[in-house]
Amino acid sequence: MTTTDWYAVFVACGAALQDLGERLTSAQHCIAVPATPDWTVVDVYAHLAGVGTSLLTGSMHGAPGPAWTAQHVESRRGTPISELVAEIRSCEPALAGMIQGSARPAVVWDRAVHLADLGETLGLPRMPAPLWEPILEPIARQSLADLPIKVHAGSHAFGPGPTVVDLDPYELFRVLFSRRSRAQVRAVFGQALNGQQCDGIQLFGQREDDPYKPA
């Protein structure tokens, strides 16, 4: 099995966040981002800046709970997005060892998931596969391991079977990270899974709203 260079994914997502941040208008800063704790676009940047700084300083009380992430946002309220981007990028070299030493680096996954949140919120094209596809492999293998299906997602196959379900790999990535509603998830799996099984595969629980309607 190929070993993922998680640090490279982390830095690539950081570069994408920087590129996006430099192109955002002031009106876009205030757009609400679905599937977050009532955050705006700029609040997502504040959270991502706070995660890196908290890891570097050891400020991990309450992590990864809502009070911990809320503090990232509130303490940076009013900070220009250019400064948030600088904070996001500046933490990367010092986190290299921590990231490379982890088989499942949550900080990388968090950055990639929120980058996808921003792209979907702003109606941008799907972000490049190297920024999210490495994450799909470990999360899908864990989430689908005990279900009576085999999911074909692009070049990937997950689950023991016997029922075969064909899914778009990016959509599976978003489903597993609770970025699709309960109704959307059940529509994706149809009769292959029951409601309880559909609910159980989403890492952060279920959503009743449709945070994003795929084309």
Image: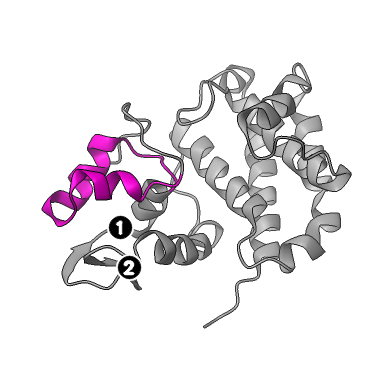
Q: Residue type at mark 2?
A: Gly
Q: Quadrant of residue 73?
A: top right
Q: Is residue 121 above or below residue 133?
A: above
With 24 as the anchor, is 183 left or right in this view? Answer: left
Q: Determine which of the numbered discs, if any, sits on residue 154 in the image.
A: 2
The spot of residue 79 in percent (x, y) is 79, 21
What residue range appears in magenta? 177-203
Classed neighbour count for the residue bearing mark 2: other residues with Cα under 10 Å, few (<14), some (14–19), many (≥20) = few
Q: Which residue is mark 1?
A: 168
In this view, the residue in front, 134 or 176, is 176
With 11 as the anchor, is 146 left or right in this view? Answer: left
Q: Does 117 appear in magenta? A: no
Question: Most prominent secondary structure in the magenta stretch?
Answer: helix
In this view, the residue in front, 160 or 3, is 160
Q: Is residue 173 above or below residue 85?
A: below
Q: Is residue 71 visible to the viewer in this orientation of the structure?
A: yes
For image coordinates 49% across by 50% down, the residue present is: 127
For image coordinates 27% across by 62% down, the residue present is: 147
In this view, the residue in front, 19 or 135, is 135
Q: Is residue 62 above or below residue 185?
A: above
Q: Quadrant of the C terminus?
A: top left
Q: Determine which of the numbered discs, if any, sits on residue 62 in the image.
A: none
Q: Quadrant of residue 85?
A: top right
Q: Residue type at mark 1?
A: Asp
